[in-house]
Image: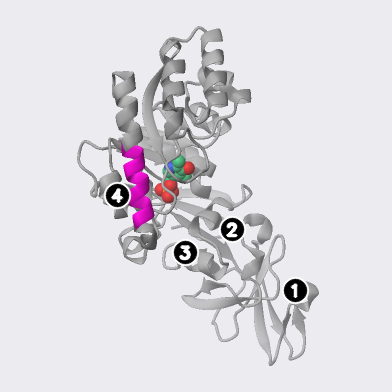
Amino acid sequence: MPRVEETILEIDLNALDHNYRVITSKLKPETKVLGVVKAGGYGSDAAVIAEELEALGVDYLAVAYVKEGVELRDAGIKIPILVLHPQPANFEELIDRCLEPALYSKRILKAFVSVASEKSQKAYPVHLKFNSGLNRLGFREDDIPWVTGELSNAPSVTIKSLFSHLAASEDLREREFTIGQINKFRAIVKEMHANLGYKPLVHQSNTSAILNYPEAEFDMVRTGIGLYGYGNDKAADQKLKPVHSLKSVISQIHEIAPGESVGYNRGHKASGTEYSATIPIGHADGIPRSLGKGKGHVIIKGRKAPIIGNVCMDMLMVNVSGIDCAEGDEVLIFGDGQPATTMAQNANTISYELLTALSHRIKRVVCRK
Ligand SMILES: *Cc1c(COP(=O)(O)O)cnc(C)c1O
C-alpha cells in the first residue's frame, strides 16, 4: 500500500470477493443473491461495491432510496436494483431509471400503480413487502385480499418478488420469535401464490439469517453487513475480512506537562508528563464523541493509543506516551487488525452505525490487498 498522508478510507475489493465467497458457500447453488449497497455501500463507495458485486455475479442490488439507485445507474450499473423504501415523489424518476420499488402499503401501492399506468407501463417489476413482525414497513397478512384484488386490475405492474425482513436474526435468544416470523411469512407466501396463480421470487434473510436460519433461505437472500466483513457474531467475523480500513496520520505531537490539559473543556488532564498526538479526523467524520475520555483508542505502530479528552469536530487527540512514533506516522482507526466492531462496542453502538456514519469528506481509496 502507498504511504498514508491524510485521512483515508481504504476499500479492499479482495476482502469483498472473499466475503462474497464465504456467504455464498452457505447457500444452495440455486439461491439468488441480492447485495445491499444502501447508505453508500455501508459508508464505503456504493458504485465501486456495486460494480464489483455485478462482476461477481450477484442477481440483484438493493438501496433504500431512489436517489441512491439513480447514482448507481449513473455509474453504469446494469443489473436489477430494488429500492427498499421509495416515496411517491420519486416514482417517475424510479421508472425512468429502471429501478424496482418495494411496495409496502396500500397508499404506496396505489400511488405507484397510478404513476406506472400514467407512464403507459406494462408489467413493470415491483416487489411486495410484508410485515412478519418487525412492524416497520409492509403489508399485513390480512391485506392480501386487497392487494391481490388491486393488482388483478393493474396490468401496468407485475410482482417480481414477495419479501419480508427479520427483526432479530442475530440474536439467538429470540430464536422462537424468529422461527415464528419465518412461519408467518411462509403462510403469507402460500396465500399469495394461491391468489396470484404464479410464483414471484421469495426472500426474507439478511446476513445473520443466512448464518443462523437456513430455513429462511427461500429463493434469494439479501446480504449487506456480511459483504463488508461483519457477521454480528465472533465466529462469523473470524471468517470474514473487513472491506473498510480507516487510516490517518499524526499531524502534531505535544509534550504535556503534569497538570496541563488537552482539548475542549479541558477534557483530559495530564497526571505526569505525557505525549499527545493530534489526528485529523473528528466527530464530523463519523467518529462518535462518546469515544472520548479514554473510551476508544486507535492503533499506532501496532500499539493502542487511547483517545484523550473530547473528540473535536475535525480532529481528536490520543495518548502516545511510551509509543515510539513521530509526526507523519500512520494511524489505524479501524479495519484490518482492529475491527470496527471493537470501536462500535466502545461507543455503545453497532458496526452498521459506525461504518455508515463515515463522512463524504474522507478520501476513498480502492485497493486489492
Ligand atoms: C439493510 C437491509 C438488509 C441488509 O441487512 P444486513 O444485516 O446488513 O445483511 C436486508 N434487508 C433489508 C430490508 C434491509 O433494510
Pointer 2 local density, CA inside 10 Å: few below 14, some 14–19, many at least 20: many
Instruction: Tell me if residue 251 can be seen.
Output: no
* Residue wearing tag 4: 23
Badge nearest the viewer, 2 or 3: 3
Q: Marks 4 and 3, how far apart in space?
A: 19 Å
Q: Which mark is residue 7?
A: 2
Marker disc for residue 356: none
Label 3 CB, ligand 1: below 8 Å? no
Of mark 1 and mark 3, the one earlier in the sequence is 1
Tell me if label 1 and label 4 are in contact, CB under 8 Å: no
Mark 2 or mark 3: whose residue is earlier in sequence: 2
| Distance from the alpha carbon under mark 2 to that under mark 3 | 20 Å
Residue 180 within the segment the image draws in magenta? yes
Q: Quadrant of ligand 1?
A: top left
Looking at the image, residue 327 sits to the left or right of residue 324; the answer is right
Mark 1 residue crowding within 10 angstroms, few (<14) / some (14–19) / many (20+): some
Tell me: residue 261, above or below residue 362: below
Q: Position of residue 148 (x, y in %)?
A: 41, 20
The part of the chain drawn in magenta is 176-186
User: What residue sits right under mark 3 in the picture?
Assistant: 341
Q: Earlier in the sequence, mark 1 or mark 4?
A: 4
Outermost residue on the left side: it is 29
Element class at badge 1: loop
Which labelled disc corresponds to residue 263? 1
Q: Amino acid at mark 3?
A: Thr
Q: Amino acid at mark 2?
A: Thr
